[in-house]
Amino acid sequence: MMLRRTSALSRRLSTSAYDPHALLHSSRIPTSHFQDSLPKLGVPKLEDTLKRFLYSAEPVVSAEALAEATALAAEFGKGEGAALQARLVAADAAKYSSYISEPWFDMYLRDRRPLLLNHNPQLTFKDEPSAERATQVGRAARLVHASATFLRTLEAGVLAPDVFHTNPKRSKTPWWPEVMRLLPRRVSFYGAAATGAYPLDMSQYANLFRSTRLPRAGRDELVVAAATRHIAVQRGGGVWKVPVLDADGGTLPLARLHASLQAVVDAADAAAAGAPVADGVGLLTTAGRDVWTAMRAALEASPTSAASLSEIDGALFMVNLDPAAPEGVHDTCLSMLMGNGTDRWFDKSFQLVVTANGKAALNFEHAW
């Protein structure tokens, strides 16, 4: 397995008036300002949990099965359940994060089924309004550029915090961010809540870019690389390394990104015309997790393959330039979920999929 590089031509392109350090915006309230004071999700009472269990079971089981479940729930609540509830409450008190966070991640990472269809939802974007903008490379370049700008805004700490505004007349005002930013972090959530605005948890934003799910025996591992500046682009079974950020951390010009992606398309299509592509390695990420663990270990026995896998793992994100041109809801959904399996890398936290007719989607790994 070898990761390819784009041509020198695309690296020479630039735009003289372009500002590589322009951000999406610059929030007056720092991105993580509310994180230290977010209240935890409370541990529900055992009796309430059992009631919810029986309530959810009632519509889908027979009367006999429901009666049996009711008896078992009562027995559990008086016996083992009380001891387990006490352990859960004690564990919750010992850490800041929600009691459900660790079991939630563990549930996903221990699942040995393939990620494909089980853990890779997709969000299809609206079509471009004009044919001129609905080109594959053009749309992909704009999405990559926007994603990189979002990343830099996040890393600069000036991405606007996620806030649910229940009373916009009070909280969506010029004075609100000025007051909120002056509140100490340990109480800032409560100051916002007093105005009917409820900040949301943003801890997972740190895992959005440069992240991957590594296959491991029994339980996978979530890994985030540091300080990489490239994306990994797939087409025709091959994978290309494409720079997105410059040496100073700025976003490369849109024209250069466009040229790099066009170079990938040209190289992949030329290879496909000459001979069948031999290394559709992305297909391996559709296998069961233990199967993929063994196959990846075999690949990593080669220093070249190990280096290429490391570059994919550390890429900001994946871009799939799919040669298909789906029409209609059914074919588009199938294309965005899996395509032919070859031009996908389901371990990455997210993939931008752009088809030959300019349709685009975000396909993401559910554990992140």
Image (cartoon, grey):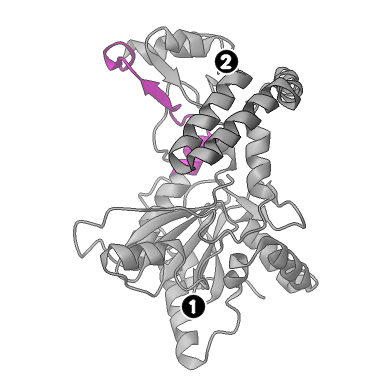
Residue ranking furthest to the front? 64
Q: For the N terminus, give its image quadrant.
A: bottom right
Q: What element carries label 2?
A: helix
Tag 1 near tag 2, CB within 8 Å = no
Going by the numbered disc 2, the residue's amino acid type is: Ser
The span picked out in magenta is 150-172
Task: Give the mark nearest the N terminus, 1 or 2.
Answer: 2
**Residue 108 vertical placement versus 66 (above, below):** below
Q: Which residue corresponds to the image point at 58% horizontal and 38% vertical from the top-left?
A: 206
Note whether residue 325 is visible: yes
The extreme bottom residue here reads: 274
Cα distance, mark 1 to mark 2? Answer: 48 Å
Q: Where is residue 66 in the image (x, y as percent from the top left)?
A: 53, 36
Disc assigned to residue 301:
none
Using the rendered view, name the quadrant where residue 100 is placed.
Answer: top right
Give the farthest residue toward the left: 130
Determine the residue positioned at 32% across, 62% down. Answer: 359
Residue 331 at x, y percent in the picture? 33, 68
Reading the image, the residue beneath label 2 is 37
Give the labeled residue for mark 1. 236
In magenta segment, residue 8: no
Image: 162 above or below 362: above
Q: Which of 171 and 137 is in front in this view?
A: 171
